[in-house]
Amino acid sequence: MTIKREVYLDYSASTPVDPRVIDAMMPYFSEVYGNSTSSHSQGRRGENAIEEARARVAQILNCQPSEIVFTSCGSESDNLAIRGAAWLASQQARPTRLITSPVEHSAVINTVLQLGSLLDATPVVVPVDRHSLVKPDRFADACRRGAALASVIYANNEVGSVNDLAELAAIARQHDVLFHTDAVQAGGQLSLNVEQLGVDMLSLSAHKFYGPKGIGVLYVKDGIELPSVLTGGGHEGGRRAGTHNTAFIVGMATALELAYSETKERLTHFRKVRDQLIDGLCSRIAGAQLTGHPADRLPSHASFVLPGVEANALLMHLDLNGIAASSGSACKTGNPEPSDVLLALGYSPEEALCGLRLSVGLQTTEADVHYALDVLVEAVGKLRRLKREIVT
Amino acid sequence: MTIKREVYLDYSASTPVDPRVIDAMMPYFSEVYGNSTSSHSQGRRGENAIEEARARVAQILNCQPSEIVFTSCGSESDNLAIRGAAWLASQQARPTRLITSPVEHSAVINTVLQLGSLLDATPVVVPVDRHSLVKPDRFADACRRGAALASVIYANNEVGSVNDLAELAAIARQHDVLFHTDAVQAGGQLSLNVEQLGVDMLSLSAHKFYGPKGIGVLYVKDGIELPSVLTGGGHEGGRRAGTHNTAFIVGMATALELAYSETKERLTHFRKVRDQLIDGLCSRIAGAQLTGHPADRLPSHASFVLPGVEANALLMHLDLNGIAASSGSACKTGNPEPSDVLLALGYSPEEALCGLRLSVGLQTTEADVHYALDVLVEAVGKLRRLKREIVT
């Protein structure tokens, strides 16, 4: 009998805050507490901390500090990019089409759909391949007709595949279409060099790379006069009003720096335990299929379809055994509908109910992997037997 | 000679986080770190903390937990209320007029103005009296013609006056106009009982009552189907997408509870040191005028016009002597323009350049007040002498 333990395999949903990040944030709660827009020394100390953090984030993105907009989360960054671009096009009487893919985060999809009715912006959904990657030729077809914006996810949150952003961004640029990417899952693992990627806007969220929940970034290339969709004071160069969350801004910069100064060790570790999970699961569970691209995927990310094993039942079983996993995006769990992402990839509705996402992190150990595999094998066996008994 | 000390008199701009609030938040950084929408025990622990916090906030507002929407700041709350109401009216082909006052926070004014061009919503600005209070008869005139929303500030951030919300909200209700209030400055000091106030929506921000910067609340009365302006996952009953900032949500609930369980002691203290400031300043500085209502004002808030003393020069002088003060809203400091609020109150442009806001808090001592008064008297004397020398 295996002894029950707590195993967190849902780092794609959220990560614990690194103790070094907490240390960096602490002075900004009750020592340096001035409002960053106040013109006295308490205020300036906050402002200086924010501008220093902005420069540190900009360095990792290889951009100017003025191109960094601090937001409250990745969803807000996505909203600002898409709403701003759609409204900008509408003001300039340019095409308001919004190009995206069927496997985007809900903050992209739902914003595009809402703008369809608010601004008469026409959503254009470019198909993806079996691995969730946007098809460049179909993307080029969409761009050719003009658009306010194209928004394509960097690394998919459900199946982990990594789009070739540089190729897609070049196509968009060729057709004078602004290019935004939701890089929330990529943050801390893939290159965020915006010059090399060629993107015009890029969204990040700190809690995916051991920073706090409640702080995000939108990179906005200089020259894009994005109208603000959260108006008030002139914060963030007039692009995002609201008193600065000094502590979390400093925390995010610290978390991002740690992620990229320790990339090699982190990714080596992620890949090792992730591959142990993939190999163990595919060899020990009959019919298990890895979803997403087998090679071009996030180092921390494993995702599967386990035929005949309904995800919600499996997750409940895992949870009872101390294992935190997911069927897909954290923003959708609990939803008994088949995964839209898996459907878009060509899986059947039955298969799309059987998705499993296991994502590893800094704290994941080999012992965690072994325990998780043992529990998974047992749970899948039980659920399949149960299903056969019900059917027969 | 007075020995220099650090005296913070800008609590209206922001407050230090209460150590008890920090203690309440700490477990949600690296112990309970699950995404609140995840369906495993780590996620549920976060969700439970959020729902418990929601119930605690609801209790203080005397409303249902379902009527509490967590946002990232007071500005976002204002934006959600105003943008949501304007869009709701536009969808329902009802009047899209937006009634407000000339002394609102920039998150209200600038949002109303932006919607003027985005949705053809007509801004209607109801005049205020010399104390910054909205005139009920003029407000009734505006409501009579129908509107998507009326938004009136609870306690003014620059001059501290407190509007009679119950009276204004009753007028709005009579004319079937939704009533929102920016209660950001009022939070922690005035009653937030939404039933007694009769408001439909109310904005709060935690960092004004010893909670962290980067978290806010919008109360939305049940039955108002406010469209979300930050779309994505189904968080907050579909009214505000984005991963929950669990730590700050718990922190805000704690800060709000502390403020209202300790109201009597806090307000007694605020009034005492505030009145010492007002009495000292008005008796020792010739021509000093208290701005805002002499009685119906925030207990923590003192504001003045000091004729012939340009605010920016005075603030610089105070800052050099360790005193943090403000000329008005923190979102506007550094702005060399005369205060829009003081102009709207009928002060001359010259007077409106001479505003001073001193706001006290939990840490303010009588020694702070004495020091501040001494420095102020000296600084005002110097600046007035300098001005006379330049003129002659």
Image: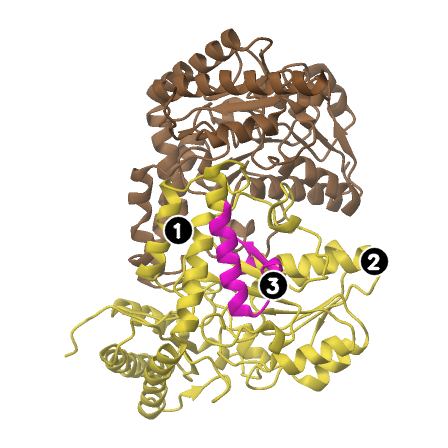
Chain colours: A yellow, B brown
Front in this rendered view, residue B11 or A5: B11
Q: Give the mark nearer the N terminus: 2 vs 3.
A: 3
Label 3 is placed on what type of residue?
Answer: Gln
Name which residue lies at 36% across and 90% down.
Answer: A282
Front in this rendered view, residue B170 or A250: A250
Q: Is residue B215 visible?
A: no
Residue placed under numbered mark 2 in the picture: A92
Cα gap from disc 3 to disc 1, whole angstroms? 31 Å
Do residues under tags 2 and 3 come within 8 Å of each other at their CB atoms? no
Residue placed under numbered mark 3 in the picture: A64
Viewer-side label of 3, 1: 3
Q: Is residue A136 left or right of residue A276?
A: right
The relative height of residue A341 versus residue B63 in the rendered view (above or below) is: below
The relative height of residue A141 versus residue B56 in the rendered view (above or below) is: below
Q: Are marks 1 and 2 on the same chain?
A: no
Q: Magenta residues?
A: A47-75
Q: Residue furthest right?
A: A93
Rendering quarter of residue A147: bottom right
Do residues under tags 3 and 1 come within 8 Å of each other at their CB atoms? no
Front in this rendered view, residue B180 or A201: A201
